[in-house]
Image: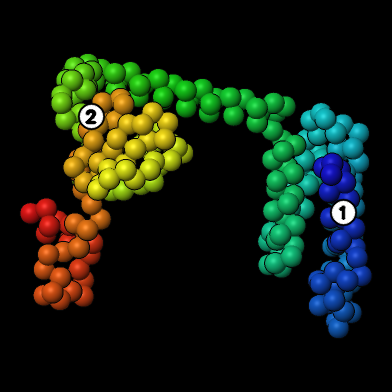
Amino acid sequence: MKLSEKLLLIASWLEHEDNAILVDAENDDMCLTVVASALIKAADAIREGAEDVKLVESEVVSPEALDEMAAVATAFDESGDELLQKQASVLDEILLTLGAPKGTLEVSKKLEENRIVELKKKYQGIKKEHDEMNKISDAEEAIKKAPIYKEYRILEAPLNTRYCPDHPGAMIARVGEHQWQCMMDHKLYNFESGYTTLNGNKVPGGGVDKQTPVHQDQGVMMFDTRQDKLNTISN
């Protein structure tokens, strides 16, 4: 909806017979006359502004029209009536849109985007300096060369599975006690004693039976957690 059409809707609402302000004032003839006269003047001023906006919809509205609309919005805001104050906020938004130079919003967004880009560059530059100062790349290379780099921690890998660890989705078949064989390359896996994957990752042995606490017969505390029990076992 165009701005001029929004203004005309506001003007029509002011003169409508169901306007809450007119309804409140209808019991007092003097008040009704004053209120009706004020609303008619406001509606006429808004219609004038709508005509100006309609003629130059994409251009800047005349200062006189803006002043008239601003005066109406001020009167609505100071009326104390909740409905009129809402209409005043609508008028304020329209005035801000009309009063802003063409392209102001686009320029503002562009400046904000440029500012974000500059902040990112600044942060990345500082991070790079800190990484070089602290020799982060050397530390990462040293960690990758360490034997423990390719070793899984306990419970980090599945304790048991019916799918091949090296070929996701490929089934494995049980060929012996704790022995499983991949259906694709026939490699053997022992989940209890541990195994090494094709890329060199070492998976420690384990089993679901070792998750049960040794001291289970001593009873379970109310706030015991699985993690606490596992820590007890590992210690």
Indicate the position of residue 209 as horizontal and vertical percent values: 22, 58
Instruction: Identify the residue under disc 1.
Output: 9
- Mark 2 packing: few (<14 Cα in 10 Å), some, or many (20+)? some
Could you say which disc has been placed on residue 150 in the image? 2
Depth-wise, is mark 2 or mark 1 nearer the camera? 2
Quadrant in which residue 129 is drawn: top left
Relative vertical location of residue 158 with respect to residue 38 in this rendering, above or below: above
Residue drawn where x is 20% and y is 28% of the image? 149
Question: Camera-side residue: 185 or 193?
Answer: 185
- The tag on residue 46 is none
Give the residue type at disc 1. Answer: Leu
**Where, quadrant-wise, is the N terminus in this rendering?**
top right
Tell me which corner region of the image, top left, top right, bottom left or bottom right, holds residue 61. top right
**What's under tag 2, amino acid-wise?**
Lys
Residue found 32% across the figure and 43% down from its top: 175
Depth order, front residue of 12/127:
127
Outermost residue toward the front in this view? 175
| Residue that lies at the very extreme toward the left in this rendered image | 235
Q: Distance between the residues labelled 2 and 1?
A: 71 Å
Q: Can residue 32 be seen in this view?
A: yes
Along the horizontal axis of the image, is 84 left or right of 19?
A: left
Q: Which of 196 and 125 is in front in this view?
A: 196
> SS for tag 1?
helix
Q: Where is residue 140 in the image (x, y as percent from the top left)?
A: 22, 22
20 and 206: which is toward the camera: 206
Residue 197 location in percent, x, y? 29, 30
Q: Residue at x 87, y 79 (%)?
A: 26
Residue 93 rendering spot, x and y as whole percentages: 70, 46
Name the element at disc 2: helix
Q: Residue placed at 44% from the left, 21% from the top?
A: 118
Eyeballing the image, is 159 above or below 121? below
